[in-house]
Image (cartoon, helix red, strand yellow):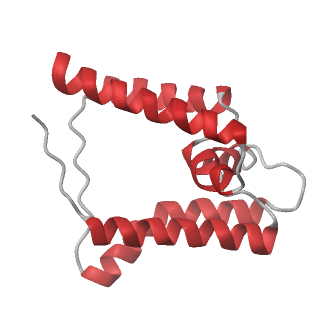
Amino acid sequence: MIETSFTPLASLAGGALIGLAAVLLMLFQGRIAGISGILARLLPPEPDGEAAGRLAFVAGLVLAPLVVYAATSAWPLAQIAATTPVLVAAGLLVGFGSVWGNGCTSGHGICGLSRLSLRSLIAVATFMASAIATVFVVRHLL
């Protein structure tokens, strides 16, 4: 069985920062913090003059490990027990799902649910059911 570490304080802090980022983006830009939508409008940039803000948002995601290192003097550990083909397939499926579902977990799960969107509720229920089924199959059947 694969064990996962229980980190309630780190999880609470991370969730609070994600929620804060979503609230600030909505407050100051009137935009939903859906990562797939932000990235999709960045490549290629839409001619709406907001590419710099989108780039800053994505850069914050990419540079976050540097903030962790500066605060703790240690790099965050990432352990992924999967082969490269599995990771590529998973990435393609997630990307396809984000396009097909017209949004990702951050857009639907954080921003959509907080706005009481029925579409987001259905999307999140689908994400969660898929995740539960995947974990069950991988941990108990394979």
User: Which residue is drawn at the image coordinates 35% and 24% (left, top)?
Assistant: 133
* Residue 105, x across and y down, in percent: 55, 44
* Quadrant, the C terminus: top left
Q: Farthest left residue?
A: 1
Residue 9 image offset from top left, x and y in percent:
30, 72
Residue 101 placement, left or right of 15: right
Q: Nearer the viewer, residue 86 or 34?
A: 34
| Residue 108 appears in the rendering | yes
Q: Residue at x 34, y 82 (%)?
A: 70
Q: Is residue 35 above or below residue 75?
A: above
Comparing 130 with 82, the one in front is 130
Image location of residue 73, percent across then percent down = 24, 80
List the single residue furthest toward the right: 48
Which image quarter: residue 33? bottom right
| 118 with respect to 98 (left or right) | right
Q: Nearer the viewer, residue 93 or 1?
A: 1
Q: Quadrant of residue 77?
A: bottom left
The N terminus is located in which quarter? top left
The answer to whether any part of residue 103 appears in the image is no
Q: Nearer the viewer, residue 1 or 62?
A: 1
Q: Position of residue 82 (x, y in %)?
A: 24, 32
Image height of 62 relative to 73, above or below = above
Q: Residue at x 59, y 59 (%)?
A: 58
Q: How many marks?
A: 0
Name the outermost residue toward the top: 141
* Position above or below: 3 against 64: above
Q: Is residue 66 left or right of residue 7?
A: right
